Image (tube, rainbow, N blue to C red):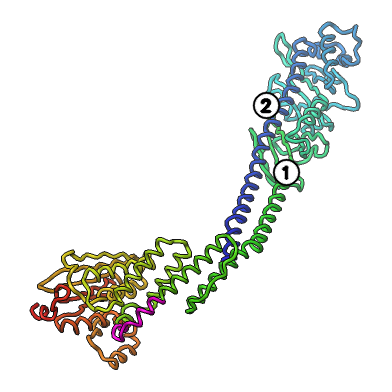
Amino acid sequence: MNLRYKLFTAFVGLIIIPLFILGMIMFFVTYNSIEKKYSQQSEYSLKAISYSISNVFKDMDNVTDNGIATSVFHMALSADDPSKQDLTDAEQLNLNASQRNFRSLLYNHPSISYAFLYNFNGKGSSEIVSVFTKENFRTMPYDKFKESDLYKQVMSLNGVPKWLAPHEYPELTGTEPVFTQIRLVKELSFFQNIGILVVQIKNWEFESIFRNLKIGDSDQNVSFMLVNDDGMILFDPDRKLDGQNFESFTTKQVAFKKGFQSFKTEFDGEKSILSVYHLKDYPWSLVSVTSWETLSREVTVFARWFVIVVFICFLAAVFFNLFFMNRITGAIAVIVRFMRRVEDGDLTTRVEEKGNDELTLLAKGFNDLMNKINGLFNRIQVEQRRKNQAEMRVLQAQIKPHFLFNTLESINVLAVQNEGRKVSEMVYRLASILRISIQGRDEITVGEETKHLRNYLDIQKFRFEDLFDYEIDIPEELMSCGILKLTLQPLVENSIQHGFEGIDYTGKLIIQGWEERGNLILRISDNGIGMTPAQLSLFQYMVNENAEQEVKDQPENRMYHERRGLGVRSVADRIRIEYGDLYGVFICSSPGLGTIIQCVIPKYEQGEDHYAKSIIG
């Protein structure tokens, strides 16, 4: 994947997709928040409706309490002609003071629809005493009423009013959507039960209560109703659902229990929020049904705008990628193409410098680096032409071309990154390595060899940053001793290239030196992959070309031949030719436990007759 697609993918993955996910989270959080807040509002509204309804009932309770306290109902029940106790038909002059006061109270309370008394002591037409008549309404006979469960409930309440909602007892209250109070009447002197009062009130006040209350905005589609504990809809201000079963309109079974509950479900085929509040002193529940579509209208509009904004952002990303990133990635691609030409060996290639931005600085840095590399290569070529064939073989055996190329490539990368200090340091170390490698003398001091080795290891550390660590422990008094140049570097290179190949941990190189019985001992130990005993057994000194080719051609020995070919064998052969058969390279290794390579040479100062000293040693 090229840089252009990577940047576009990063923009979409790090901006567009997180923005979309954030919007979805906000959308669902807002949805849940709307439901929660609306449930709180509906709870307050239903409690307010409940309070208003209770006040209407309590007001009527006070009216009937007044009638009982003033003995108006007692006088009506004990009158000689109970059929003439209707306060709506009686003449004002024929009423006593208590009746006139109570009649004024009734007329001042316009919500009363009718009122009558069941007379416990009456017979025939005197069993039902009309107090407030109602046209086209026939009361239930007292004998039939006495057999109903309602009669038992009223008697058990012992004078406490019982309220009946519409459609609960139509045989007693009729089919109109009105509320009815029924209570036991007692004679106040002896507290004897003398009758039962039935008062029906009109629904004007209830309709005004429901219609004057709204939840939230006026645009919301909200409907209220009163439902009993059995699920019957007792009162619907819109007169559409009166007398029907509540569960036939919803897919969720509702338990009309005490307290408040609110949930989202379908009602009459439309997704809605149902809020239910059970009245404290009555077996009824107030229910509000709110259309979810009207509640979530603003959130839906927000979601649409959010999708539009995300889509515009995506188009902006595409536009940015097409018109702006093309120039950036195109310029980088040109520089990469020229770098590949350099990899193919064309060191004369140069990038055209145009513009005044960072890309121009990158092209200029590339050209400057190529000029420096060309100058460095030219200087190396001049030095290499001054060497004889023997020195060329040693140099090629120790400094492999890929090491030099990879080092220069690392320098190139650092130069592109404007790491001037690191470029200077690596060029300095590379120059030091080349200076020691191509100089005319074969013998140098241990100090110079150590400096050469440290430069080589530092370059490798730049290239393989986390591959290995190294430690050099050679006493200062041995630094002036003589040694063949390029003795330690090929052995260390062997450990790095082969001992640490494929490891998943940090390698460790330890270079040690000490004096032992007149000899200089140099040991290179690593914690790499090691070698098998079969591979160690193939190590030989001074193998001729035919024998070497036979060993190399064996498949199982190819990897091992590379491990000891131009590095370890060259050092071993040179030591034995220079110092004799008593000296050389010794290898100790085991699979998974690393490798130890130990060089044994005579200890002598540079310029001394080391051959004579070796015989003595």
Q: Name the residue under label 2.
A: 281
Indicate whether residue 385 is drawn in magenta: yes
Instruction: Give the x, y percent position of residue 599.
Output: 20, 75
What amino acid is found at the position of numbered circle 2 in the picture?
Asp
Classify the position of the C terminus by image quarter. Answer: bottom left
Q: In this view, does 99 lie above or below 540?
A: above
Query: Who's the residue at 68% across and 23% down the image?
Result: 156
Query: Who's the residue at 35% across and 87% down the image?
Result: 555
What amino acid is found at the position of numbered circle 1 in the picture?
Glu
- The residue closer to the viewer here, 59 or 602, is 602
Q: Name the residue under label 1.
A: 298
- The residue closer to the viewer here, 183 or 399, is 399
Question: How many neighbours does mark 2 have within 10 angstroms: few (below 14), some (14-19), or many (20 or more)?
Answer: few
Q: Which dot marks residue 544?
A: none
Q: Earlier in the sequence, mark 1 or mark 2?
A: 2
Image-quadrant location for residue 600: bottom left
Q: In this view, does 340 lie above or below 6?
A: below
